[in-house]
Amino acid sequence: MTFNGIWPTMVVKRELPGFEEPTAGLAAYILELEARESNYTVRYLEQSFFASERPAVRWLKDQVDQTATAFLRHCGIERALSWSLISWYNVNRYGDHHAPHTHPNSYLSGTFYVRVPPAPPSVDDPQAQPGCISFYDPRTAANMITVGTEPDARAAHVVRPSAGTLLMWPSPVQHYVHPNLAEELRITVSFNLMMNRNTGAA
């Protein structure tokens, strides 16, 4: 008898070592950019965050590249590949959130958490889960036929990140960024990884 785990969904969660100094530099740089144009978050396609030569930005890009390499090796891909990164920052004020969505035209997506305010002590809606990100089962309605004991029976996988957390996942996976219900800013850097065509990967 053989049990095959087919169609797995890999979500990487990595707590970056020594993140304190680089994230302080990232926060300062992002707030500097935000002071120039406060609605730049919603115009993320105009950004190219990793193009900056600031040391903190170079550090983060290196960490993303290392994590992507480990992700691919975990999936059994050993050959050398090359990719391009589209990147942008997000500044979420009170009530800001990102509705369920996917990231088309890319292979992997991810977010690095620069600043995460503590969850408020009381929230009227228990489903709000402030500060969290939810990933949804790509198997349409699979949770409707479960008997409730399977480890993947829930339709959503919820992650509560903290400052210094790097998440990475396949771009077609739908996800939802829960609202920031703190008065402090939530600051993140998100990215899409696109395989270069000459690597033989789509």
Image (spheres, grey):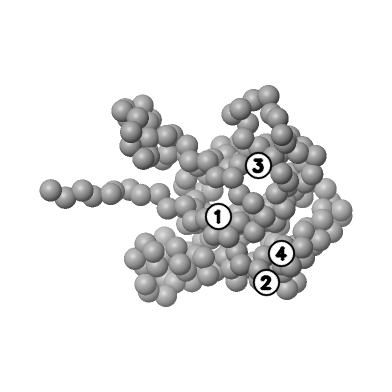
Of badges 1 and 2, the one in the foreground is 1
Q: Provide the residue designation for mark 3.
A: 131
Query: Upstream in the sequence, badge 3 or badge 2?
Result: 2
Label 1 crowd (10 A; few <14 / some 14-19 / many >=20): many
Determine whether label 2 and label 4 are within 8 Å by CB: no
> 182 or 193: nearer the eye?
182
Mark 3 → mark 2, Cα distance in angstroms: 26 Å
**Mark 2 belongs to which amino acid?**
Arg
Determine whether label 1 and label 3 are within 8 Å by CB: no
Question: Mark on residue 20?
Answer: 4
What quarter of the picture does the C terminus occupy? bottom left
Mark 3 → mark 4, Cα distance in angstroms: 19 Å
Residue 55 image point, x, y percent: 73, 73
Where is residue 21, by image quadrant? bottom right
Q: Is residue 121 visible?
A: yes
Q: Provide the residue designation for mark 1.
A: 167
Question: Mark on residue 100?
Answer: none
Q: What is the secondary structure assignment of the residue under circle 4?
A: helix
Determine whether label 1 and label 4 are within 8 Å by CB: no
Residue 119 image point, x, y percent: 69, 40
The residue that appears at 59% across and 29% down in the rendered structure is 127
The residue that appears at 40% across and 49% down in the rendered structure is 9
Label 4 crowd (10 A; few <14 / some 14-19 / many >=20): few
Query: Upstream in the sequence, badge 1 or badge 3?
Result: 3
Q: What is the secondary structure assignment of the residue under circle 1?
A: strand
Question: Mark on residue 58?
Answer: 2
Residue 196 image point, x, y percent: 48, 67
Label 3 crowd (10 A; few <14 / some 14-19 / many >=20): many
Q: Is residue 51 visible?
A: no
**Mark 4 belongs to which amino acid?**
Glu
Query: Is 98 situated left or right of 67 in this image?
Result: right
